């Protein structure tokens, strides 16, 4: 099997530091203490591959060669990054495009890339529907349906793929500048071909619709009722958590993390470092999050500020997950992706999701979610 392999080494660097993306913000991300996420996730993917009939085509250096060499795979470098002046010897989208075209010229069966929605868009702009693609999620915003749910699931999918079966996956174009301003504007860029195997790819993000107002009010009423004056609450992104803020009569960062203490905002649009500093001042902490509609990610998509380092301080029991029954019915699976496999495993096989006033379900993690009815929240 001939596989194109492209690593965007800077994808995801803006997540933990609260930049909501890295496009045009690499210098700022580095100044805030960001570290590269893609290389480690690329290595996780490669270490999980079990099949031996593979030869990779990649770009030199940190765009794939380093990881493939360390993993001991057979590979050919088909492109060397150009490092244009003014980039500080950093790779750019043009390098991704050139590598992708060389992979196509070498008749690769599939192009696998490490990145986010921007990288997916760049790859698809080259491949169209003529070459299959698969994303390893390393970006901040991952709303497209061409990504495996994790590096490990990408490896399992590739190992089971028969080279012939395929399905369609949405490539979503997200306006990053508007996203940073708190506005989620997504457009369908196109439908790519992705491998079809027993290991599914993630779904495209679903925007909430319909009459969910009453359900949100019930969830918000219950959450505000159980909030304690001696506890700091980290409130995650989204309209579901926004209902809690509205109930409290406070402002809310729609696409960020806010901190609330005694019904007052004590931190707005926080990054990981700011959250860790807050944890030094508050003994009791709870984290209120809602899964992304249809995708089902509770952690790891757009809220990387709640990192495994934060969770190591708060403990898994600090997590309060909220979602309407309608959202859960439209979400096949729930996932936890802290960026650390050991931390992911701490959460076990199920998680409680509050879905109404004093109502909750026990939902499976990382497998089919079955909504079998509500039980009293405990």
Image (tube, rainbow, N blue to C red):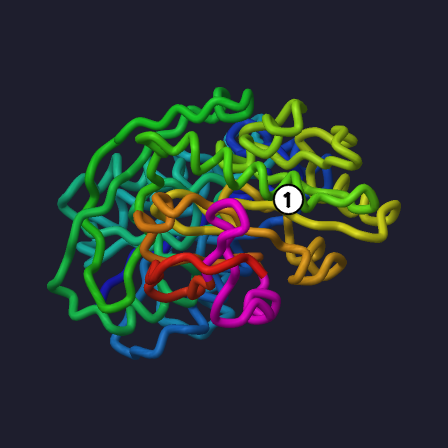
Q: Is residue 85 above or below residue 49?
A: above
Instruction: Name the side, left or right, on which 233 lies relative to 166.
Output: right
Residue 67 rendering spot, x and y as whole percentages: 49, 63
Residue projecting furthest to the right: 281
Give how far across and how far down residue 222 sits, in percent.
59, 43
Q: Residue at x 59, y 63 (%)?
A: 340
**Residue 279 shown left or right of residue 111 in the figure:** right
Q: Is residue 58 left or right of residue 234?
A: left
Among the 4 quarters of the image, the one containing residue 324: top left
Judge whether residue 9 can be spotted in this image.
Answer: no
Q: Nearer the viewer, residue 53 or 287?
A: 287
Magenta-tinted stretch: 340-361
Q: Is residue 48 visible?
A: yes
Task: Determine which quarter of the picture holds residue 16.
Answer: top right
- Residue 343 within the magenta-colored segment of the rendering: yes
Q: Using the image as rendered, state which of residue 327 and residue 54 is in the foreground.
A: 327
Residue tagged 1: 305
Give 62 or 353, whichever is nearer the viewer.
353
Looking at the rendered image, the quarter that the N terminus falls into is bottom left
The quarter in which the C terminus is drawn is bottom right
Q: Height in image: 316 above or below 281?
A: below
Position of residue 164 in the picture relative to residue 101 (left or right)? left
Q: Residue at x 65, y 58 (%)?
A: 308
> In the depicted view, which residue is nearer to us: 106 or 26?
26
Bin the neighbour count of mark 1 within 10 Å (Cα to Cα): few under 14, some 14-19, many 20 and up: many
Count numbered badges in the picture.
Answer: 1
Q: Residue at x 65, y 32 (%)?
A: 27
Residue 199: x and y, percent?
29, 66
């Amino acid at each position: 099997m001939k596989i194109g392999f492209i690593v965007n080494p800077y994808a995801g660097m803006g997540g933990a530091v609260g930049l909501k993306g890295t496009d045009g913000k690499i210098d700022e991300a580095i100044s805030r203490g960001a570290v590269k996420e893609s290389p480690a996730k690329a290595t996780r993917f490669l270490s999980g591959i079990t099949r031996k009939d593979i030869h990779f085509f990649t770009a030199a250096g940190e765009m794939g060669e380093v990881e493939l060499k360390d993993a001991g795979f057979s590979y050919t470098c088909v492109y060397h990054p150009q490092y244009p002046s003014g980039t500080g010897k950093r790779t750019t989208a043009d390098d991704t495009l050139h590598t992708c075209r060389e992979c196509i010229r070498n008749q690769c069966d599939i192009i696998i890339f490490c990145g986010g929605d921007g990288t997916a868009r760049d790859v698809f702009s080259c491949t169209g529907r003529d070459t299959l693609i698969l994303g390893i999620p390393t970006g901040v915003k991952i709303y497209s349906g061409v990504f495996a749910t994790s590096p490990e699931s990408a490896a399992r999918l590739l190992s089971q793929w028969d080279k012939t079966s395929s399905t369609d996956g949405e490539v979503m174009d997200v306006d990053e500048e508007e996203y940073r301003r708190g506005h989620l504007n997504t457009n369908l860029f196109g439908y790519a071909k992705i491998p079809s195997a027993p290991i599914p790819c993630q779904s495209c993000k679903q925007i909430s619709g319909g009459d969910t107002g009453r359900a949100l009010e019930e969830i918000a009423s219950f959450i505000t009722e159980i909030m304690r004056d001696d506890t700091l609450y980290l409130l995650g992104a989204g309209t579901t958590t926004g209902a809690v803020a509205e109930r409290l009569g406070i402002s809310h960062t729609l696409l960020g993390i806010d901190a609330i203490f005694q019904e007052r905002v004590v931190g707005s649009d926080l990054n990981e470092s700011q959250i860790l500093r807050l944890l030094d001042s508050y003994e009791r902490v709870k984290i209120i999050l809602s899964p992304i509609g249809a995708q089902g990610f509770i952690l790891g998509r757009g809220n990387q500020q709640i990192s495994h380092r934060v969770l190591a301080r708060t403990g898994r029991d600090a997590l309060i997950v909220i979602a309407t029954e309608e959202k859960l019915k439209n979400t096949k699976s729930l996932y936890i992706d802290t960026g650390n496999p050991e931390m992911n495993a701490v959460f076990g096989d199920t998680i409680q999701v509050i879905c109404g006033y004093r109502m909750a379900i026990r939902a499976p993690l990382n497998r089919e979610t079955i909504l079998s009815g509500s039980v009293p929240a405990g």
